[in-house]
Amino acid sequence: MAALKHISIIIPEGDCSITHIEATHQIMSSVNGLLQSLGKSPLFEVQLVGIHNTPQIKKGLYAVYPDILAADLQETDLIIIPAIQGDIQKSLELNTIWLDWILKHYKKGAEVASFCLGSFLLASTGLLNGRQCTTHWTAAESFKSAFPEIDLLPDKIMTDEGGIYTSGGALSFQNLIIYLIEKYAGRDTAILASKMFMIDIDRNSQSPFIIFKAQKEHKDEPISKAQEFIENNLQNKLSVDQLANMVAISRRNFERRFKKATSNSILEYIQRVRIEAAKKDLETSALHINEVMFKVGYSDAKAFRSIFKKITGLAPVEYRSKYRYEGN
C-alpha cells in the first residue's frame, strides 16, 4: 500500500481566502473516495494547520478550526498557502511567523504551493528568488516592485519549479489542485476529479482574463502625455520618433523613461492599448472583426490576429464567441 501523502493547508492570520481553504480540503479529500471506488487505497491525509486554535478569517466573519498546530506538525509532504487578502503589507506582517516554518519543512523535503496572492507570502520566504512564479494578474506590478529578483509570469495559470508551485488569480487554484492530483495520483484520477468538480483540465493561461490597465501612477509628466496621445490616436500610425519628438525627449531617453514608468516598451504599450480596445469592441459591438481591426489601428489581418492571440491567448473570433453577450 502506498504511503499517505500528507497535505498541510495553512490558515494564515488575518484576512485570507476561505474558499481556497475549504475547496482545497474538499477536493483533495474527495480523491480518497475516488481511489477507493476504483479499488485503490486512499492517498491523501489532509490537515488544516494553524498558529493557534481559533484563527479568525474575514474580520471575524468565519472561524476555522485547525486539525493541528504548526508547532506540533513534525513532517508534511505538501504545504498549501491560500491567498492572503486586504492590505497585503499588513497581511505579510501578521504572517511572518509562517516564513521560518515553511522554510524548515521545505528543507526537510516538503513541496510548497501558493494560490493567487498567497504568492506574496511564499515570495517572502526567499524560496522563489531566481525562480518563475505567477499570481493574480491585477497584482503583477506590485509583485514585481516588491520582489524584482523573481521571474513573474502573470499570464500563466500555474508554475512548477523545484518542488514549488504557484497559481494565478482567484479560482485558477483549482487547476493547480488538479495538476497536483495528477502528479501524486496519476492522470486517470486527475481526469475523474476534474469531471467530478467540473474543472477545466489543462487550462494554462490567464491571458483571456487579463484587463490591461495602463500604469499611470508614475509622476513622469512627458510619459503621461505620450500615454494619453497613444490612447486617443489608436487609428493613426504611431512611431517612437514621433512620440519622442512630441514630448521633446531624445529617442533613447524616451524609451528608457517609458519602460521605467509603465513596465512596457513603447511598442508593447501601443499593442496592449489597441488590443484592449479591440477586446471591448468584440465584447459589445456587432462590428465585423476586420472593422474592429481597422478601428484600433491595424491594417494587416494576419498581424492583428497574431498580436491579439499573443496577448489574449485566443483568436479574435474565439474571444468574441467566449465573451460577447448574445443580446448584443
Image: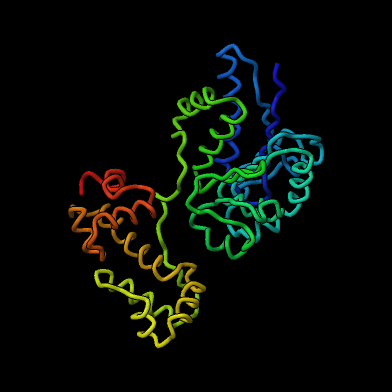
Observer-nearest of 117 and 40: 40
Judge left or right: residue 110 versus residue 28.
right
The part of the image, by quadrant, that contains residue 91 is bottom right
- Residue 281, given in percent of the width and then of the height, sits at 25, 57
Answer above or below: position of 156 versus 65.
below
In the picture, measured across the screen, residue 249 lies left or right of residue 237, that is right
Question: Between 232 and 284, which is closer to the camera in this rendering?
Answer: 232
Picture residue at 59% right of the left edge, 56% below the top: 151
Residue 189 in view, yes or no: yes
Q: Quadrant of residue 70?
A: top right
* Residue 49 position (above or below residue 295): above
Instruction: Please provide percent x and percent y for residue 324.
Output: 27, 47
How is the structure coloured here?
A: rainbow
Q: Residue at x 40, y 60 (%)?
A: 212
Regarding residue 26, the answer to whether it shows in the image is: no
Q: Quadrant of the N terminus?
A: top right
* Residue pictured at 45% horizontal, 46% vertical: 205
- Can you say whether 304 is above or below 79 in the image? below
Q: Residue 257 at what x, y percent from top left?
A: 49, 78
Name the foreground residue: 82 vs 17.
82
